[in-house]
Image (cartoon, helix red, strand yellow):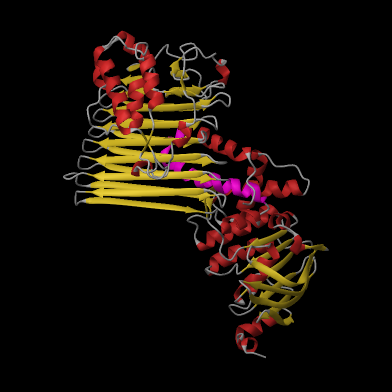
Amino acid sequence: MLEIKNLHATVDGKPILQGIDLEIAAGEVHAIMGPNGSGKSTLAYVLTGREGYEVTEGQVLYKGQDLLEMEPEARAAEGVFLAFQYPIEIPGVANTTFLKEALNAVRRHRGESELDAMEFMKLLREKTKELGIAGDMLKRPVNVGFSGGEKKRNEVLQMAVLNPTLAVLDETDSGLDIDALKTVADGVNALRNAERSMLVITHYQRLLDYIVPDRVHVLARGKILRSGGKELALELEQKGYADFTQAA
Amino acid sequence: MSETSQQSLGTEAFAAQFQARRETLPGSGLGWLGALREAGIAALAERGLPTPRVEDWKYTNLRPLETLALTAARPDAPAPSLDLVPSLLATTDHPRLVFLNGFLRPDLSRLADLPEGVELAGLADLIAKQPDWLQSELSDDGKFETTALTALNTALMEDGAVLRIARGAVVERPIELVFLGAAEAQPLSIQPRNLIALGEASQATVIEVHAGLGEGVTVSNSVSDVHLAPGARLTHVKLQDESHRSYHLASLRARLERDSTYEGFGLSLGAALSRNEARVRLEGSGGHCLLGGGYLMRDKQHCDNTTVIEHLAPHTSCREVFKGALDDKARGVFQGKIVVHRDAQHIDGHQLSKALLLSDDAEMDAKPELEIYADDVKCSHGATAGEIDHDALFYLRCRGIPEAKARSLLIQAFLAEAVEEAAPEALREALNARIIAWLAAKPQGAN
């Protein structure tokens, strides 16, 4: 599904990613843990093509294609999804309009027919019901005035509607109380299947109690310094990142 | 004289037009009207057409007008078929006046079955019938500063819409005024004069649509005088979609008596150069004025929104919200002056101008001015001009929405704030449709 090879990236000329190697097979959930400033979000943005994140070396293959050559919208249409750490507020664009535009853009790209208003509302009602999202959130402008929990649930809703094959979850637990965390994690778990891969980025082990990963990687100083099974997350919770942050 | 030091442009062409036509202009047999026109042409000659050397015209240059060999529009232009008359309304039974090159076309208008309390007619017709009140309505009472453009209009006005709403009448159906410009090789000068007077506690909605038929050049210099009696409420929406070589100069002068409300919204899409100048006098306590505007400009289009709001009585309020997007080498101007006179206490005034620059060559000039001579006053203003929000753009693209579409959505959303705040709900969809059509005319690429 995803192969990252010796990935180096800079932000404002400053090296952030310094040789990442990572492979995620179809259906696997990998977690990336690391201290603040280790490059976790940079990795998420490089994978989705955000402006200002410059790849200086290395390669990323997604379903065998060169991901880094693609425009952000093409990556999305090919099934790459980023759940933002800080979802962007878009005044003046109703959430429903946004979701419909996004879904139909992706469907067009995939050669599928666009959904009309009725078909779309039917789909949306199903998904919102599963995620416990109030209809009111759909009418409001995208993320405007949403609570932290609502914003994160809205990200999961978008993921459920767009049906990606690779979902990158950037600090999806940040700013959530335990009930909201459970709701969001349930939503994510419901989307786990044999074809869909996930990359879960988190600072804390807490989220991984609910979204249990197949593999855990420690990202520090721009590199993956250690990889292991889900038990690695527990170890990090006990010991902290001190072992990884000191200069080698 | 060098361009930089010149205070005014020549008005000889208009003076010649006046001399040639003074005997044939409507009401030429009326002494008072003749005197009014003479005073107008004299005031124009004295002032000259303004140049950017004049503070009020700092950012808008009328010099291109000098190069046009303007002739006065004539009433004999061939009428378009009825279905080519644009409208902001889906209904086909609302009262409507249609003007072609400034002249009322009864064949395209709908004047039958006017709602109770509504008087609607063409100015030239009323001048011919000589109602006494027309003299007082047209005469300069000195309440508004005479500008070169209002003086020019007074000298050469021929026709326009006259709307009077009777005291207490609440008119549900909107009244539409359509101004069509249809010039051929010869650029035409048009001087529409509109009068809108609402009686005590009456309510009405007036919609103006200005559009060009074909690509000819028209120079429309309109004056609209609005008078709201105590407790009256006017909703006034204007769509300006003239041909891209035309000039649209519009002066609005509104007097608001006690407890009256004026709510205006204008969407500017067309014309090579447009200036919407609104002067509002809040003369009685409890008066409220809302001025809203949206503009979408591309190529070398120029759109100027200039407002002067005078608070002359206590407990009056105003709110202004202007938002627009400028592409290519387009230029936008917002000049907003709020004057609070001495003894006009408890004033609330808010002004907002926001522009989205879609290209590096687009330009926005904003000049807010507050002149406050009272002490219990709450006034604020804000003016911004910036690029499209890159974070929002990335967010939309990250969900699969192609860049051009994402940009369109964001521009539409940007304008929506002004539409939602200042345009009546019943017209928002029609206005948004115009915005969407503008966006669709050229894909929004990365600039």
**Residue found 54% across the figure and 14% down from its top:** B79
Quarter containing the C terminus of chain A: bottom right
Q: Is residue A206 magenta?
A: no
Q: Nearer the viewer, residue A121 or B407?
A: B407
Q: Residue furthest left?
A: B343
Query: What percent of the width, then of the height, locates residue B386?
Result: 50, 54
Q: Does the rendering let one see residue A223?
A: yes
**Residue found 20% across the figure and 42% down from its top:** B314
Magenta part, dominant SS:
helix
Quick check: A38 above or below B362? Answer: below
Quarter containing the N terminus of chain A: bottom right
Q: Is residue B421 magenta?
A: yes
- Report the span colored magenta: B401-426
Give the number of callouts.
0
Query: What percent of the width, then of the height, locates residue A236?
Result: 64, 84
The reply, left or right, for residue B181 in relation to residue A23 is left
Q: Does the rendering let one see residue B160?
A: no
Query: What percent of the width, then of the height, locates residue B407?
Result: 60, 49
Q: Nearer the viewer, residue B422 or B223?
A: B223
- Quarter-of-image position of residue B15: top left
- Quarter-of-image position of residue A133: bottom right
Q: Residue furthest right?
A: A64
Q: Nearer the viewer, residue A138 or A36?
A: A36
**Residue found 36% across the figure and 17% down from its top:** B19
Quick check: B295 above or below B378? Answer: above
Q: Nearer the viewer, residue B1 or B364?
A: B1
Query: What percent of the width, then of the height, locates residue B10?
Result: 39, 31
